[in-house]
Amino acid sequence: MYLRTTQRKNKDGSVTKYYQLAHNERHPTSGKSTARIIHSFGRADQLDREALVRLCRSIARVCGVKVIDPLDDDDHQGGLPKNVRIKRTVEFGTVRVIEKLWEQYGIGKTFRELTKKKQVPYEKALLAMVANRLCNPESKLGVWDRWLETVYLPECNNLELRHMYEAMDIFHDHAEEVEREIFFQVANLLNLSVDIIFYDTTTALFAVDYEDEEEGGLRQYGHAKEGMWAPQVVVALAVTREGIPVRSWVFPGNTADVSTIETIKKDLRGWNLGRALFVADSGMNSKINRKELSKACGKYLLATRMASVKEIKETVLSQPGRYRKLSDNLRAKEVILKNGKRYIICYNPGEARRQATHRENIVIMLEEELKKHKDKSATKKWAIALLASRRYKRYLTITDKGTVRIDRKAIKTAAKYDGKWVLETNDDKLTIEDAAYGYRSLMVIERCFRSLKRTQIKMMPMYHWLGRRIEAHVKICVLALFIERIAELKCGKPWSRIRSVLAKIQATEFVTPSHSFYQLNDLPKGAKTLLKKLAIDRPHKVFGIQHIKKDTAIA
């Protein structure tokens, strides 16, 4: 039995459809299957639809099956009442945490004090720009035009694009005051150690062909940390040993690192930060740079090139004396030479074992590779590939006969440097512990720069050309780094892992004829623990209930 459809063509060319209940019977004479009409429902355009649905439900009830009517709004929406509509789903978790930390550590309060006489919520504009750097970095136009509608930040609904730029200008005009106020609030709340402040510099490139021609322009040609010449700015950052930013600076792109130190020390004078220490890797360690650092009354802690500096290779590393154990994987000892130079030799047993194992594996691989070839001439294609490799060439040598062999002397020499690094300092008051951990703080700064420039916050590319906007953009990125490091210290996890959990916390907006509200999805695994460590209350399941005016309600 089935529902049969027939149609008839009218004189005017239109077609009329009819519905009939029929079943097939076999004709007694021909033996062919023919349709027998049991009931006619009439014209399709005049059909009593409810009567047909009732018949279907009656049959389904006998069969124990539920009928789902595709035109029934209640079933079509998965059980939602007819007057309730789903408007959108937005990211909630990440911006919620950023906003709470923004308030916990006084950042919002500091900005509100600066703008309390203004009618525009500039503080919320800054919050939006900072939060965006930690979520999905965009240009200021992208924040206003695209990103805000994908996250739960209702306070920013009425912001205009110009408010973003005006907020940047206000931040630029009060940057020192803001950075000082925020840092000391955080230092007190987190009980940070501020007896020694570490600072270093990096560069930020611009996708332009020419530097600024006007006097005092920030975009100047310089040698970038990435190894190229381009219009750029120099960004200096002072951090605590925990990696919490203290203050940031932006210098013209042609500024030498050592020439920034006097400005930085002058700006930090009066902050009661103990002493400021310039920490840098071996690329900064040269006779000229050390002289310039001393001229600026700067105390420095510089890494050295152990294998290429004769004084260190032959004298410093050969000095007798026991290492002092500072932690499970850190030993250190002091070496003071007759010329007055002070060195700190650091040793990591765990890293030494790792490097030794790595070298042993390389040597085994080289031995197997050499066994494969009877002709070991250095001119062979395989030999050239090994000699050109940065990984293998240090353990190979070419004999007088032009053949390749493993350099056993180089292997023995390399073993002397396993797990070691040597630091040079002109600070007589710097303890061995502070020196060793200070270099680790350099690694923290390097990680901060990586986050600022590439991995998380992505300070580049910069879309600004006015000097004040460039500085404000850098400082907004540093504020984002500030919140990132607080979250990492409290959770004991990198921001990328924190963000991956928080991003799964989303909220769906529902709209009725009279109200709108948000409903939170179930918290993902690990979210409760993160929120507890960050001292943030678990959000309510339903929130953001708003009355809707009749002229804006969705019927």
Image (tube, rainbow, N blue to C red):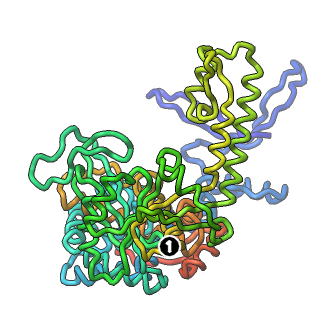
Which residue is painted at 61% across and 23% down in the image?
398
Which residue is painted at 58% across and 72% down in the image?
491
Give the SS element for disc 1: helix
**Taking the image as drawn, is residue 511 in sight?**
no
Residue placed furthest toward the front: 338
Q: Is residue 296 above or below residue 219?
A: below
Crowd class of label 1 (few under 14; some 14 to 19; many from 20; radius 10 Å): some
- The C terminus sits in image quarter: bottom left
Left or right of 389: which side holds 448? left
What residue is shown with label 1?
A: 434
Q: Position of residue 232 (x, y in %)?
A: 26, 48
Residue placed furthest toward the bottom: 188
Q: Position of residue 405 (x, y in %)?
A: 68, 25
**Taking the image as drawn, is residue 214 in sight?**
yes
Q: Is residue 176 above or below residue 213?
A: below
Left or right of 385: which side holds 275? left
Identity, as a three-letter code, of the amino acid under mark 1: Asp
Q: Is residue 96 above or below residue 181?
A: above
Left or right of 541: which side holds 204? left
Which residue is painted at 21% across and 62% down in the image?
162
Q: Where on the picture, by quarter, is residue 320?
A: bottom right
Left or right of 466: which side holds 281? right
Residue placed furthest toward the left: 214
Viewer-nearest residue: 204 or 282: 282
- The N terminus sits in image quarter: top right
Q: Position of residue 31 (x, y in %)?
A: 89, 21
